[in-house]
Image (cartoon, helix red, strand yellow):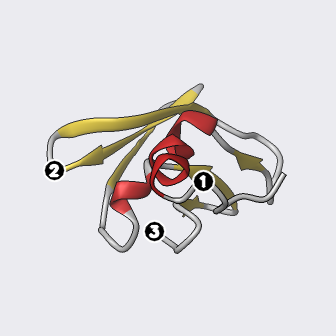
Amino acid sequence: MDRYSQITVRTNRYSVPVRLIGKKVRVMLHASHLAVYDQNVEVARHERLIAKYGIRLELDHYVEALVRKPGAFPG
């Protein structure tokens, strides 16, 4: 996972909770969605992107960072 709290699956990027930055996670791909696991706990679920180089972000994944650093995301 990168410093922007996103993982890359195939050519697409998906958000995960910021507490997982720097950790390895496991991804299960399904036909219509993907699930992200930390240990055996599901931490994110996204509708799967079909087009290449897409980005799917869940704003709730970034709330933890905003609580700690309110100016982390300007605007």
CA gap, disc 1 to disc 3? 22 Å
Q: Secondary structure at mark 2?
A: loop
State whether residue 73 is above or below residue 67: below
Q: How many marks?
A: 3
Image quarter (top left, top right, bottom left or bottom right) of the N terminus: bottom left
The mark nearer the N terminus, 2 or 1, is 2
Q: Amino acid at mark 1?
A: Pro
Query: Answer yes or no: do the residues labelled 2 and 1 have beta carbons within 8 Å?
Result: no
- Residue 50 is drawn in which quadrant? top right
The mark nearer the N terminus, 2 or 3, is 3
* Residue 69 x/y as whole percent: 53, 59
Q: Residue at x 83, y 46 (%)?
A: 51
The residue that mark 3 highlights is 1
CA gap, disc 2 to disc 3? 14 Å
Q: Amino acid at mark 2?
A: Gln
Q: Amino acid at mark 3?
A: Met
Q: Nearer the viewer, residue 1 or 26?
A: 1
